[in-house]
Amino acid sequence: MYIIKIIPRVLEFKQPAGTSRGIYNNRKVWYIHLSSSEHPKRIGIGECAPLPNLSCDDVPNYEEILTNACHLLEKEGTFCKDSLRNYPSILFGLETALQHYETGDWALWDTPFSRGEVGIPINGLIWMGDFKNMLAQIEEKMQSGFRCIKLKIGAINFEEELNLIRHIRSHFSAKDIELRVDANGAFSPADALEKLKRLAELDLHSIEQPIRAGQWDEMAKLTAVTPLPIALDEELIGCNTAIGKQELLAAIRPQYIILKPSLHGGICGCEEWIREAEKLNIAWWVTSALESNIGLNAIAQWCATLGNPLPQGLGTGMLFINNVEMPLDIRKDCLWFRR
């Protein structure tokens, strides 16, 4: 039988992280440490990392739910994934702790990535800030060799944000650098289409969540006529059943969905999203959600099994002062696993 310890930890950001939900200076995570008397030298570690004011499982009794799930795993040797559908960060932590225990290695699946033979292309993330701050971030990413850059927009004046993108385009064409923007629901339904038209003139790859989640009819109208491909992110949060996923995708018909295991159903739930999306010819990519390197490694290892050629969003594990050491490196525009 398994022996499980739950280890809470507060991660401190190297610099304040501006998001659509405010500015994070730190965040709390829980590590699941799994062992057994049969194999005393083998362990499995998984990360449970709900995001405050965003995750569907950001609930007051989170630790109680996590403790109960771990007790059941200790007692039964397994756990019911369906019973944890509404707690995706717990599901993700348990799934990956068990996978780590089974393999006995941080290389959770056998892939060219886990063998250190290839890297996973990733986007460079530009955090919300004032014009000067965001411009400095952009120039640093371009000098580092990134070929796909994602900008979080909606925090400053829209005209200034357009000027930032024009600055990039004045130096690099769409063939040189792919640009993604994430509005985090900042546009109103009334002005969203006009803003999408102006952004599309700058040869962007896509825009994430142009209007706030929960407005299916308005979002469907946009995806039907948009000149700029729309990717759903926050829209997927809390949609945790197969039927619900089918209904959402059929109603909105986005061009892309973005999958974060801690937010969107763990690994099994994200694979469900992928199956439903591909039935409708909806493309997708995978992103981390401010986990430490424990969670980032697990997402990257899983992502490497999927064969998705698009740049993924897998760089955020490097953000913390008190991070967990992991054999991960970012070289130019790829995430690598060291062997």
Image (spheres, rainbow, N blue to C red):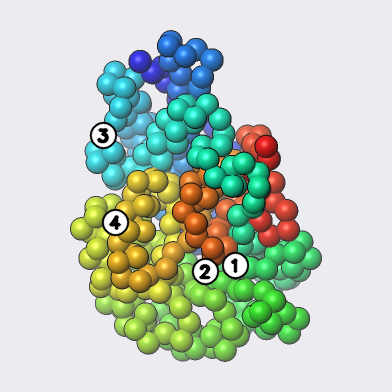
Q: Is residue 26 above or below residue 145?
A: above
How far apart marks 2 and 1 lie (CA) works out to 7 Å
Residue type marked 1:
Lys
Residue type marked 4:
Cys
Give the residue at mark 1: 150
Give the residue at mark 2: 182
Q: Which of the marked residues, 4 or 2, is nearer the chain's N terminus? A: 2
Give the residue at mark 4: 239
How far apart marks 3 and 4 lie (CA) works out to 18 Å
Q: Decide which of 138, 173 is in the foreground and name it.
A: 173
Q: Which of the marked residues, 3 or 4, is nearer the chain's N terminus? A: 3
Residue name at image x 27 percent, y 77 percent: 217
Give the residue at mark 3: 80
Residue 47 x %, y %: 48, 36
How far apart marks 1 and 4 lie (CA) works out to 25 Å
**Cβ atoms at labels 4 and 2 below 8 Å apart:** no
Q: Decide which of 101, 212 is in the foreground and name it.
A: 101
Left or right of residue 13, residue 265 in this image: left
Q: Which of the marked residues, 1 or 4, is nearer the chain's N terminus? A: 1
Q: Is residue 238 above or below residue 197?
A: above
